[in-house]
Amino acid sequence: MGGIEDDEPLSKRVKVLSGESVGLSNGLSLNEGSFSLRDSMARLLSSQGDNEAIGSKGVIKKVELVRIITEALYSLGNSETGARLEEESGIPLHTPVVDMFMRQTLEGQWDKSVSMLHKIGLDETMIKSASFIILEQKFLELLEGEKVMDALKTLRTEIIPLSINDERVRVLSSYIISPSKNLFDVSHGKESIFRSRKKLLEELQKLLPPTVMIPEERLVHLVEQAVLLQKDACKFHNSSVGKLSLLADHKCGGGDIPSHTLQILEEHNDEVWFLQFSHNGKYLASSSGDCLVIIWEVMADGQVSLKHKLSGHQKPVSYISWSPDNDQLLTCGVEEAIKRWDIASGECLHTYEKRGLGLVSCTWAPDGKSIFSGVSDKSISMWDLEGKELKCWRGQKTTMIADIGMTADGKELVTVCKETVILLFGWETESEKTIVEDHPIISFALSEDKKFLLVSLLNGELHVWNIDGCTRLVAKYKGHKRTRFVVRSCFGGLEQAFIASGSEDSQVYIWHRLSKELILTLAGHTAAVNCVSWNPANPYMLASASDDRTIRIWGLNQVNMNGSRGQNSHNNNNNNNGVNYCNGGGGT
């Protein structure tokens, strides 16, 4: 029947034993072909109390719970304990029919296992699909055993008549012509065959209904799902270290949210309009009405220090974009030019200009070999790094809003093309998709994975859109103040579980992304907060830029960690490299 001849059946290494009389885990004994399915199921149902529910809500069936616990014990290698649970509860992991089916599959009794599928109680479509998987294994083992004619017969008389998966049938046919293409490996003898058949059982397990075969590690999956649901529901969860346990329901305090001012950066001489951490979190770039761009370095101890002051723009810098490798930076003046800078040296590598027009936004291609810019005539241009304009898409492609981005697959540019419309522009195919808001758009930011878009609106609301595939609105946030200025927001925290935003009332606002609940407001600035950026590599670090000409670095409460050093620096108003070290300005 296509099986591998051996004195010691492979199934002796698993729960089901071989032999004329099959000893099953529930103590029943079956002789092949001599049992009654109806009688067996009657015995099972009478012992199981099939409809008995447990738990305070009455939604958990005792039979199902015992079965998944038993499966977990076997998966963990506690076979004796699993068998004991089956015996004491009277609830078998599988019915006798399924036990027999599994044994036949593991022993390579292919014809019998295919026949047994009809006794399990499956519909015809599922029987065909399961038969195909089993007979494919039979075919491959015959081919590996150099029984080519038997393999060909199996293909022609058993697999092809199923009339499913024609593409796979063609692949199997090619193995007859070119056996070297066969990827099935039995070079390690019985152990390799056993592993392959175990994998076959896993595939069947995924295909068959869970009432027939419990999905692998089902209990672990349910427990993990419960823990993750508790984590997602926790409004303050922002740490991956030692916070999740099976021994108690999960709940965090607010101590892991960056809500205390650790540093005040004071090197800008005018309102600070924009700031953004590099992708690796090692640098922070800020721009201001003073036409300067400053590169700050995040040191190993978490302190932020000045690295470079970049001068050269003739107008205030409204937008910044980090290269994919974090080694270069694009900066864009208000309707002026784009400059590309080297982070290590602070040198300006190139200036991009378009005669008679101003550039209003900038972003990198995913490979870092070209850049895109919005132009004041509402077009979009693509440039190589040396400044050659490679392409220009004319028409209503952008506005004077400085934001521009790229989707996760690198195929669509994201811009604001009209007052209330966001454009997803396929720059290779020139396809266009739009997102229409009810109010004018002020700014937007992309999530780290580029699958979500955070839009700031004139009416003071923040909207999150899923732009991965079909676009849809998934969340709204409100509470911050915005009436006159451009105020920017961002995703952030562990797994980007939070939304942060500036506000015209001089505070930083933080919402829990999933619940949409406003959880913190951070006071400290003395004028409107224009922009915020959450360190992508450090969930405990948040930066904010303000019209008060300062940048605040927010972190965890460090009074007890280095209070003496920080308090002295703050009280004495000592300025070190444009930085004040603080202990205060906590959130509410």
Image (cartoon, grey):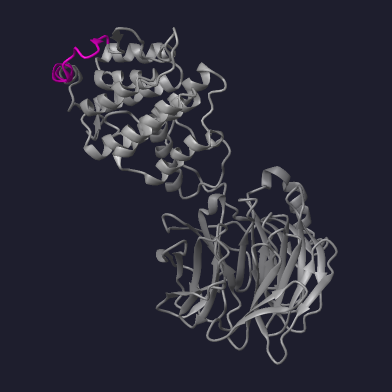
Is residue 547 visible in the rendered image? The answer is: no
Provide residue 4's location: percent of width, then percent of height.
Answer: 44, 17
- Please say whether residue 125 is one of the residues in the magenta stretch: no
- Please say whether residue 38 is one of the residues in the magenta stretch: yes
Left or right of 11, for residue 85: left
Q: How many marks?
A: 0
Provide residue 144's location: percent of width, then percent of height.
Answer: 50, 26
Q: Could you say which is closer to the camera, residue 87 or residue 162?
A: 162
**Magenta segment boundaries in residue numbering:** 27-42
Left or right of 258, for residue 347: right
Rendering quarter of residue 168: top left
**Residue at (49%, 70%) from the top-left corner?**
455
**Residue at (24%, 35%) from the top-left corner?**
59
- Position of residue 456 relative to residue 262, above or below, is below
- Position of residue 448 relative to residue 526, above or below, is above
Provide residue 177's location: percent of width, then percent of height.
Answer: 50, 37
Is residue 523 visible in the rendered image? The answer is: yes
Q: Could you say which is closer to the camera, residue 576 or residue 42?
A: 42
The N terminus is located in which quarter?
Answer: top left
- Position of residue 54 relative to residue 302, above or below, is above
Left or right of 545, for residue 522: left
Provide residue 255's location: percent of width, then percent of height.
Answer: 56, 47
- Position of residue 496 relative to residue 9, above or below, is below
